[in-house]
Amino acid sequence: GEVLHIVGAGMAGSEAAWQAAEAGVPVILHEMRPQVGTFAHRTGLCAEMVCSNSFRSDDDRNNAVGQLHWEMRAANGLLMRMADRHKLPAGGALAVDRDAFATDVTEVLSDHPLITIAPGEITDLPADGHWIIATGPLTSAALGRSILGLTGAEALAFFDAIAPIVHADTIDMDIAWRQSRYDKGETEAERTAYINCPMTRDEYEAFIDALLAAEKTEFHAGEESSAPDPTPYFDGCLPIEVMAERGRDTLRFGPMKPVGLTNIHRPADKPYAVVQLRRDNALGTLYNIVGFQTKMKYGAQTDVFKMIPGLQNASFARLGGIHRNTFLNSPSLLDDRMRLRARPNLRFAGQVTGVEGYVESAAMGLLAGRMAAAGILGRDLPPPPGTTAMGALVHHITGGADARTFQPMNVNFGLFPPVEAKGGRRGRKDRYPAYTDRAKADFQAWLAA
Ligand code: FAD
C-alpha cells in the first residue's frame, strides 16, 4: 500500500507515526538528529523533552491539559502510555523520567513492523506522496526556507519575543499613573488598565542612548545561523533595540507614543514619550512593559529599564528575551484536516502549527497521524468536536484564531464553547467539571464513529 512519510521524530512526529502504523499504514519517520542537531536537543532519541520534564497537570476534571491527557489515553496514545510508565512523583503534575521515556518511545517505534526510522535531514518540501511535517519550533534552516517559499514571509514566524514583567508594588505611583489610552473602556477597571511612566525629552534621549549601547545576547549556538537571512520577525515582535536602531524617534511613534494620555501628577506637562505597562495577571500584582520585547543581556535590561521614571526601584518577575520558534500562520494556511490548502498532500502537526507545549504538540501529532492514515485508507476523518480538548485546539489553529494576531497557544478552557454550571451562575472554576464531562462524552462519541 501507500506509505506515509513523517518528518521529525519529536513529540508530534513520534505520536503520528504510532497512530498511523496502528491503523495499518506503513510509515517512514525521517529524523535529522543526531546527524544534524538543534541548540536544545541533546540526544538522537525520539520524543526528547528539551526543557522541563513535565506534561503538566494530570487532573482531567478541572484542568484542560489534564483533559487532553485523558483524550490521548482514550485514543491509544503512545506518548501518554510511555509517560505513565515512566512517571515520577510530582504532586498533581505528570512528571516523567525523560531519558527512560525517550528511550522507550524510540524502542517501541523501531520495533513496530510498519515503522521505519530513516536518519537524515529533509531539506525541501516534497512535491508528491503523503507527508506530515512535524519539525517543531527548531525546524532546520533549509526546510524553513523551503516552507517560507511556499507560505511567504508573513505566514511563517521564526522568533518569539517576550517582554519583561514587573512586580506592581515596586512601581513608583507618585511618578506613574493609571490610565488607558484615550480613557478607552466600558468600566473604571478598563479605563485604568494601564500604568504609564512619563519621559521628558532629555530622559527619552538618554534612554535611547542606553538602549543602543547596551550589550545584546547572542543567539544560542546555531540559532542565528539556522535562521534565514535576513531574519524575519513578525512585525509585532520587533525587539525594542531593533526599533531604536531604525531611528531615534521610532519608539516615540511606536510603543512609547505619548498620545491620549494625561499625567495626573503634572497635567500641564505633556510627556515627550510614555512607557506603558499592562496588567499581566488577574490579581494585578504583575505588569508587563508593553512592546518591550528585547534581547539585551539580563544585567543590561535591569540597568536600562530602571532609567524609566517610575521604575527606578522596579523589581522584575521576569526579564525579556527572544527565542527561536518556527510556526505557521495556521489559520490562514491549513484546512480543518491539518492540510496545507495550497498543497493538500502535506499535513503539518505539532508546535510548527502554532500550538505550544509537549502535550499539545503530541495531541496534534495524534490527530494528524490518524487523519493521514484515514486518507491513505480511502476514508475521511473529521476533527473531534470543538467541545473536546483536542477539538478545541485544532479548531483554534485551523480557523478559530484571528490570523492577523495568531500566536502559539496552550490548551485552556477559554478555547471551549461556554457551558452553564448546574444550579445557576457560579464561579469559573465550578464550571470546569462541566467542560470536562461534556468533553469526555463527546470525545468518546467521536472515537466510536
Ligand atoms: P520537536 O519535539 O522539537 O520535534 C521536532 C523534530 O523534528 C526534532 O526531533 C528535530 O530534530 C526534527 N527536525 C527538524 N527539522 C528537521 C528536518 N528538516 N528533517 C528531519 N528532522 C527534522 N514545551 C513544554 O511543554 N515544556 C517545556 O519545558 C518546553 N520547553 C521548551 C524549550 C525550548 C528551548 C523550546 C524550543 C521549546 C520548548 N517547549 C516546551 C515547546 C514545545 O512543546 C516543544 O518544543 C515540543 O518538543 C514540540 O514538539 P514538536 O513535535 O512539535 O517538536
Image (tube, helix red, strand yellow):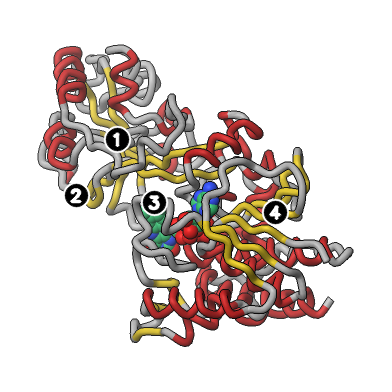
**Residue type marked 1:** Thr
**Residue type marked 3:** Thr
Asked if one can make out residue 142 in the rendered structure from this viewpoint, the answer is: yes
Secondary element at image label 3: loop
Which residue is pictured at 63% across the width and 78% down the height? 112
First reached walking from the N terminus: tag 3 or tag 4: 3
Q: Is residue 220 above or below residue 248?
A: below
**Residue type marked 2:** Asp
- Apparent side of residue 151 relative to residue 280 in the rendered image (left or right): right
- Apparent side of residue 6 relative to residue 376 in the rendered image (left or right): left
First reached walking from the N terminus: tag 1 or tag 3: 3
Q: Rounded to the nearest whole Å, what is the CA distance between mark 3 and mark 4?
A: 22 Å
- Mark 3 Cβ and ligand 1 under 8 Å apart: yes
Q: Which residue is mark 4?
A: 131
Q: Which residue is mark 2?
A: 169
Q: Position of residue 179 (x, y in %)?
A: 35, 33
Q: Position of residue 121 (x, y in %)?
A: 52, 50
Q: Rounded to the nearest whole Å, what is the CA distance between mark 2 and mark 3?
A: 40 Å
Q: Quarter holding the N terminus?
A: bottom right
First reached walking from the N terminus: tag 2 or tag 3: 3
Instruction: Look at the numbered discs 2 and 3 and tell me whether their residues touch, using CB distance below 8 Å.
Output: no
- The residue closer to the viewer here, 386 or 364, is 364
Which residue is pictured at 64% across the width and 34% down the height? 151
Q: Position of residue 222 (x, y in %)?
A: 34, 42
Q: Position of residue 231 (x, y in %)?
A: 43, 29
Which residue is situated farthest in the right direction here?
A: 378
